[in-house]
Amino acid sequence: MKRSLSALVVLASLVLTASVVAQDQPDAPPPPPPPPANEADVASIGAITAAVYECISGEKGEPRQWTRFRSLFYPGAQLIPTGKRPDGSVGAGIMDVETYIARVDGWFLENGFFEKEIHRVEERYGSIAHHFSTYESYKSASDAEPFARGINSFQLLHDGDRWWILNIFWEAETPQVPIPDKYGG
């Protein structure tokens, strides 16, 4: 038991050291700082979540609020969709904020897209927070039924002044993986 615990501590310190060293590499430019945020958008977990949904939502042909969206994310933050690949295995696509915007902007404009939170489970410890935000997706604000549902897993940091999104990791609901009742299913 002591040997396992010692090995775990050594492994954890090596991973932490490697990540700190990697961040200090001169050949890797730091991510650009985000634009200034609206104080109301970053004042609470609920506010920053609502701001994300507002930024990405809009009717067909309606430009999205990408500058506001960028202001919500900590430098280097990631957006991570997950799901089944064609071969049946599960995978994840890891994107920075700019890659996400580049991938979805055209589709949002051509199709319309609205996402709204229908349930939330939050956990906080010190300056970190996690919350599952169960969502429904619509192509128009007037749609009666969502075309998709799922869970966004937000990881957040409070730096003493404001909330920042570090990651949004999500999975869409499928018949094989329905949303459980405890998450608003």
Image (cartoon, rainbow, N blue to C red):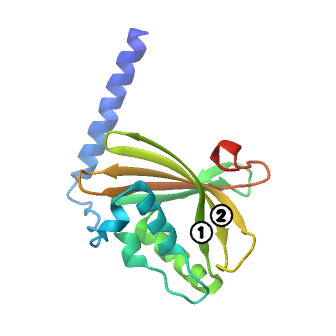
Q: Is residue 179 left or right of residue 117?
A: right
Residue 155, given in percent of the width and then of the height, sits at: 43, 50
| Residue 167 higher or lower than 122, as above or below | below
Place residue 172 in its image quadrant: bottom right
Residue in view at x 22 percent, y 53 percent: 25
| Residue 61 higher or lower than 104, as above or below | below
Residue 150, given in percent of the width and then of the height, sits at: 65, 57
The three-letter code of the residue at mark 1 reads Glu
**Which residue is farthest right?**
175
The three-letter code of the residue at mark 2 reads Glu
Q: How many marks?
A: 2
| Element class at badge 1 | strand
Asked if the residue under mark 2 is in contact with the one under mark 1, i.e. CB atoms within 8 Å, the reply is yes
Residue 164, given in percent of the width and then of the height, sits at: 34, 57
**Which residue is farthest bottom?**
61
For residue 115, the mark is 1
Residue in view at x 29 percent, y 40 percent: 18
Estimate the spatial distance between the alpha carbons at disc 1 and disc 2, rounded to whole Å: 6 Å
Which part of the image, by quadrant, shows the N terminus? top left
Mark 2 crowdedness (10 Å alpha carbons): few <14, some 14-19, many ≥20? many
For residue 136, the mark is 2
